[in-house]
Amino acid sequence: MKKILTLMLLFLFSIIYFSAVLDDVIIENLKTVSLDELKPLYEKYIGFDVNETAVDNILSSIKATGYFSMVEWTKVATDDHFELIIKVEENDPVSKINLNIYGVELIPRETLEASVTLKEGKAFSMSQLKNTIENLTELYQKENYIVSNVFSQNKDQSFVYITGKINGSQVDLSITEYALYDLEFTGNIDGLDEVLTKIKKEVNLKLYKNYLEKSKLLRIFDSEKNYYPKFSDIQNLYQILSKYVYFSPLSDIQFVPANTEKPSKILKVFVVQNLIVKTPTYIEKISVNSTLYDFSNLATTPATFTNLDLLNLVQAVKERYDKDEYFININPILKGNEFIIDVTEYKFGEVKIEGNTRTKNYTFDDLIKVSSGDYASRKSLRETYVEIYKTQFFENVDFNITPISTNVLDTTIILKEKEKKFNFMGGGTWAPPEEGKKWYEGFAAQLQLSTINPFGFGQTFSSTISLGFGGRIVSLDYGIRKPFGKPFSISTSLSYNYQPNTETLTDGATETTVSTDLTNFNFDFSLSTLKINNVKYSFGGGINYKLEDTLVSTVVNSSEISSSTSSIEYVGANIMAGISYENLDDLIIPSEGVYLFASMQKYFNISGDAPVALKFQEEFSLHFPIKNTYFGFASRLYGAQIFQQSGVDITNYLNGLNSLRGANLSGDMVLLLNNDFRYINKEGQIPFYLAIFADTGYVGSSYDFSNSFEWSSGVELGLNVPMFGLIRVGEAYYNNNWNFYFLMGRTF
């Protein structure tokens, strides 16, 4: 006890004895290193009592910069204050930095050079050299490449290698990018020819040897960069290998250099087969312990089986479960002359939700397809992910699967809520005004405010105000999913639209002007059931008020000879019922799935000349991707019919989101076919697609097809911008003209 007390007193005495106020730090002999770069290392100590430990920290920090071959110090003390004088000697300056890239420049040289922290003309620093190499490594890692550097443990197990070399006063940075030349299987592969061919086809790696065999003409339509594998490619190989029971954990994957003009490597899989029997064995009976399936078809007459024969039986059982994506574990057992395939069928245990600090569980819990006690399957996890993500309540959805017993898996759904609750946009826009109007009439000021689930109750709010010379629009929309946990969704919309329009027709000295002021108020309400087996029912209604004042005046030789006014004013109502089926993987930019919709809408007269009519709408959309690529096809068939009884005419339009792109068509009966070939990329911060499309549409008073079909084709770019949602722009070739169009909202 006395010893500990003595040590504590000595420590306290050393602090008091050596403590003094640091007035300043003066660094001498700086040449290429600026004082501003070093100040952060010591300025926090100035003006405070410091001891020898603090001085050591300052000196250590300066040495750690790596710029100096010598660091010495002295103190100039006055009473209980002192100045710290540090004398340094800089390393020789770097005369030149060479960045050598051996490959195809997977990352632009300018981006790589910007991450170099060594500077020409500045003292050399080993710390900065290491920092530079780590920065370059991080750039490749962010692009998902398999990269290592001179400081890595497994330098050879990568497809990008980064190193640095000091060459006198010069520094050579070298980046070697390796293409994937070939995929080879070696080792114990006898009898696996068919399996290995199937694996290669499933993996679908782009092999550099195939690129080298292409003619120069075909290479124009390809990119050499496609043959440089990413981490996801190798991960996919591991996942596919895990689907087959032939490969022992002792199997290994190595990257072996290949002899090609540009650096490349061969991906070699060294196969060690799982061992059930060492020599051919006589089997009298085969049995499978399974609850979900009947494997009586595997029963056979007594015979002699090799190890590969038995593995083929196990693989057949595994593939049956994999088809329905169940989680299982297979344990083959040889018991005397009986071969038993023991299958552990996992079930879901406790299901928990984490991360939704704001969002109430009842707003989305019906979308969770994982239930305690059910047989565990990847399909139910995937459906849960897709459906929850489509609500747009969360930025990310993930799962943590934890085994808690021999056949039970606890599941935690990990949610990441969106940090930004409200999206606000304001500003001015300009669009070409209609013919006969002044150029400045195209200006408009817009204000948009939207949010999804800001308070955690599943609400959606949006409002738009647009004020311009050509009119004004104000709209308010509100929706809520499962209000108070009830099994339905509600949406409402209130809009006001004022649209003045003036058209002038000149015939010699006679000028006729038609001025129209249109005012519209709309209120719509809809109620939708929750999806059951991807089917949803919708019911709704609305009220519409319309006032249209028209002034017609005729002027001859600048003298008005006639003038007349007329008004149309009415209040109408409508009710709607619809049914839809949807299993799309994304509601904004889908790449896979089907959408079906049909509705009936009845219009009623309340006052005035409101329309009385019956309207039907039908839609069928199909999306299917091209496997292992970013490409896919999308097609949509849309139809709408109006059966008018009385009142102001209602018209179907092929424009907006239901459009023959590049045209505006209208009629009682419409038919539309949209076809896209798309490149879809959702991995970046702004998901997007680029499409080549071909559309055809029909409008008429009936489906007698007396009118000809209209056609358009072109290109479209869709951007899912966080503040605005999906923005679609394109150029459509229609009626011998290229027409630009702009759309906001979902794609079909």
Image (cartoon, rainbow, N blue to C red):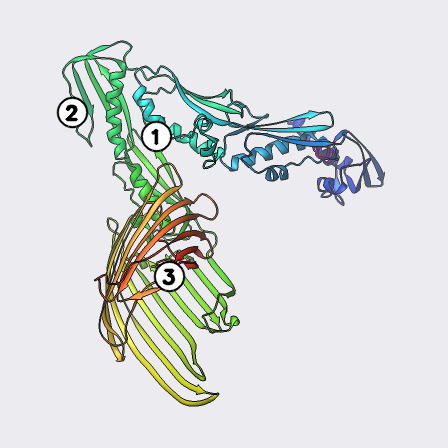
Task: Please report whichever mark, 3 or 2, sits nearer to the chain's N-terminal start.
Answer: 2
- Up/down of 632 relative to 163, above or below: below
Q: For the residue marked with disc 3, what is the amino acid?
A: Ala
**Crowdedness of circle 1 by 10 Å Cα count: few (<14), some, many (20+)?**
some
Q: For the residue marked with disc 2, what is the amino acid?
A: Asn
Of discs 3 and 2, which sits in the foreground? 3
Q: Which residue is mark 1?
A: 202
Which numbered circle lies on residue 19?
none
Q: Is residue 490 magenta?
A: no
The location of residue 276, given as percent across then percent down, is 28, 15
Task: Please report whichever mark, 1 or 2, sits nearer to the chain's N-terminal start.
Answer: 1
Q: Residue at x 20, y 24 (%)?
A: 288
Which region of the structure is painted magenta?
Answer: 57-67
Distance between the Cα atoms at labels 3 and 2? 60 Å
Contact between marks 3 and 2 (CB within 8 A): the answer is no
Characterize the magenta stretch by its predominant secondary structure: helix
**Crowdedness of circle 3 by 10 Å Cα count: few (<14), some, many (20+)?**
many
Which numbered circle lies on residue 297?
2
Q: For the residue marked with disc 1, what is the amino acid?
A: Glu
Label 1 sits on a secondary structure element that is helix
Label 3 sits on a secondary structure element that is loop
Which of the pair 360/268 is nearer the observer? 268
Q: Which residue is mark 3?
A: 663
Distance between the Cα atoms at labels 3 and 1? 43 Å
The location of residue 736, given as percent across then percent down, is 40, 58
Q: Is residue 65 magenta?
A: yes
Distance between the Cα atoms at labels 1 and 2? 27 Å
